[in-house]
Image (cartoon, helix red, strand yellow):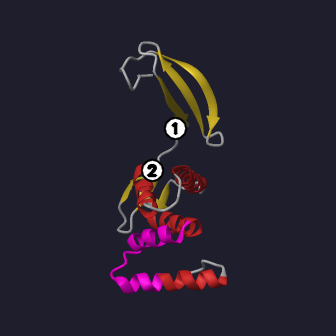
Amino acid sequence: MKCPFCGQMESRVTDSRIWKEGEAIRRRRECIHCGKRFTTYEYIEAVPMMIVKKDGRREAYNHDKVRQGILKACEKRNISMDVIDDFLDSLERDIRGSGKNEIPTSHIGEKIMARLHDLDDIAYVRFASVYREFKDVNDFVEELKVILSHQQNGSLAR
């Protein structure tokens, strides 16, 4: 494994642990040359998921793109990175668990919105504003009315 500090290829494993509920192995390594320690993760190579866009185009599922959208929605909110990472892991397990190789973006977007609603109302509205393509402030007001009525009724049914 290439050392991220000195670039040498020799390192030794100092510790290995099962991580993410058995989805990965976390390895602590020490570079033989510079002595610095670093962490690597080993995952099962999964069959690539394809995303079906609104216009019918298909592209490979991009974990980083989904993560950036969720991070943007959660920006300046009191939500830890661990919670966001668990959110993403759970979302991806759920999507992969469907057994389908092609998933519509609408399916993913709705799952994200339902989970964000449970996590943080502000993050939910931020994500919804982009996902549902709010055109003006009236769209925000309508979504806020839905949230407020659901808080009073205790549900998120649309």
**Mark 1 or mark 2: whose residue is earlier in sequence:** 1
Depth-wise, is mark 1 or mark 2 nearer the camera?
A: 2
Which label is found at residue 76? none
Percent position of residue 112, x then y: 52, 64
In this view, 110 is above or below 48: below
- Residue pushed farthest top? 33
The amino acid type found where label 2 is placed reads: His
Q: Which residue is mark 1?
A: 45
In this view, 34 is above or below 133: above
The quadrant in which residue 57 appears is bottom left
The quadrant in which residue 72 appears is bottom left
Write the residue at 56% across / 83% down.
148
User: Looking at the rendering, in which quadrant would you find the N terminus?
Assistant: top left
Q: Is residue 7 magenta-colored?
A: no
Residues packed near mark 2 inside 10 Å, few (<14), some (14 to 19) or many (20 plus): few
In this view, 107 is above or below 22: below
Front one among 123 and 64: 123
The amino acid type found where label 1 is placed reads: Glu
Write the residue at 66% across / 43% down.
21
Question: Is 148 left or right of 128, judged from the image as shown?
Answer: right
Question: Is 34 left or right of 115, judged from the image as shown?
Answer: left
Q: Secondary structure at mark 2?
A: helix
Q: Which residue is mark 2?
A: 63
Percent position of residue 30, x then y: 50, 19
Give the magenta range: 120-143
Write the residue at 54% across / 80% down.
147
Question: Is 7 left or right of 46, judged from the image as shown?
Answer: left
The quadrant in which residue 138 appears is bottom left
Q: Secondary structure at mark 1?
A: loop
Percent position of residue 67, x then y: 44, 54
